[in-house]
Image (cartoon, helix red, strand yellow):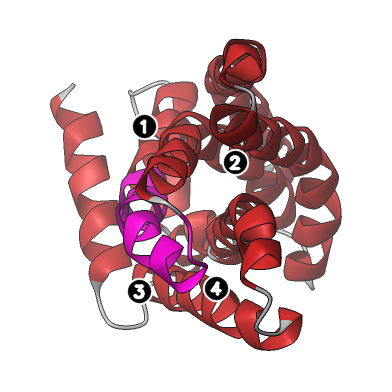
Amino acid sequence: MSALSALIRRDLRIALRVGGGAPIGVLFFLTVVVLMPFALGPDIPLLQRLGPAVLWLGAMLASLLTLDRLFTADLDDGSLDLITMGQVPLELSCAAKALAHWLATGLPLIVATPFLGILLNLEPRATLAVALTLLAGTPALTFTGMIGAALAVTLRRGGLLLAVLVLPLSIPILIFGVAASNAAILEPAKFGTAFSILCALSLASLVIGPFAGAAALRQGLN
């Protein structure tokens, strides 16, 4: 446990440095939300209707934007070989790195959501509903994206492959995240179904992601 906590602290320090990736995700999220009203025009009802989808899409793209840094820095400085050959199971190390990535990139997006909802003229109840669904769904984005990051880390032009691999896997998360957000606003009786599926996707990725990521790393580094 001490080794895993040290790995999480190390990845958090790296991510929070200038150029470490975490600030880039928040700035990208802010850019998407700020530009959307200019693209849609001054139609306030339209902004309110599309607001949850805009916030979810921006958060998903911002989270995926920094996934290529999950293992690349460790590969460049040689620490990925030490992690792979260490006494700690590689699956647990992958889970720890994914958790650190979510704390550095996913959690700030959730915290920023109530403030960015004001730009889309969302009511406080709607903004809190989106933040709740992001809290339940962004771990699935991170742990699913970790599989693609592990597959692409040892390949040339791996960033392009990462997008091809991860985006299709993220579509169900986006669908149920937006569905749960809209249900919480328009049809509260249907919120539980979509939100439960979203939580199930996060739990499934939490179990499958570390094992698939560890297998991809072993295959790529051998």
Marker count (numbered): 4
Q: What's under tag 3, amino acid-wise? A: Pro
Q: Earlier in the sequence, mark 1 or mark 4?
A: 4
Q: Tell me which label, 3 or 4, sits earlier in the chain.
A: 3
Tell me the amino acid under the disc marked 2: Leu
**C-alpha separation, residue under disc 2 versus residue under disc 3:** 18 Å
Marks 3, 4: nearer the viewer? 4
Where, quadrant-wise, is the C terminus in this rendering? top right
- Residue 57 seen by the camera: no
Q: CA distance from mark 1 to mark 3?
A: 30 Å
The magenta stretch is 101-122
Tell me where residue 175 appears, x and y as whole percent: 76, 37
Q: How crowded is the residue under tag 2: few (<14 C-alpha within 10 Å), some, or many (20+)? A: many
Q: Which mark is residue 141?
A: 2
Q: How busy is the neighbourhood of tag 3: few (under 14 within 10 Å), some, or many (20 plus)?
A: some
Q: Which mark is residue 86?
A: 1
The residue that mark 4 highlights is 33
Residue that appears at 36% across and 48% down: 124
Q: Residue at x 18, y 34 (%)?
A: 5
Q: Tell me whether the residue at label 1 lies in contact with that at label 4, contact meaning CB atoms closer than 8 angstroms.
A: no
Snapshot quadrant of residue 142: top right
User: Where residue 198 sits: x, y (%)?
Assistant: 61, 23
Please report the residue visible at 59 percent of the width from the left and 76 percent of the height from the top. Answer: 32
Looking at this view, is 20 or 71 the one in front?
A: 20
Q: Which of pointers 1 and 3 lies earlier in the amino acid sequence? A: 3
On screen, residue 197 above or below 120? above
Residue that mark 3 sits on: 23
Secondary structure of the residue carrying numbered label 4: helix
N-terminal of the pair, mark 4 or mark 2, is 4
**Where does residue 84 sit, x and y in percent of width and height?**
47, 37
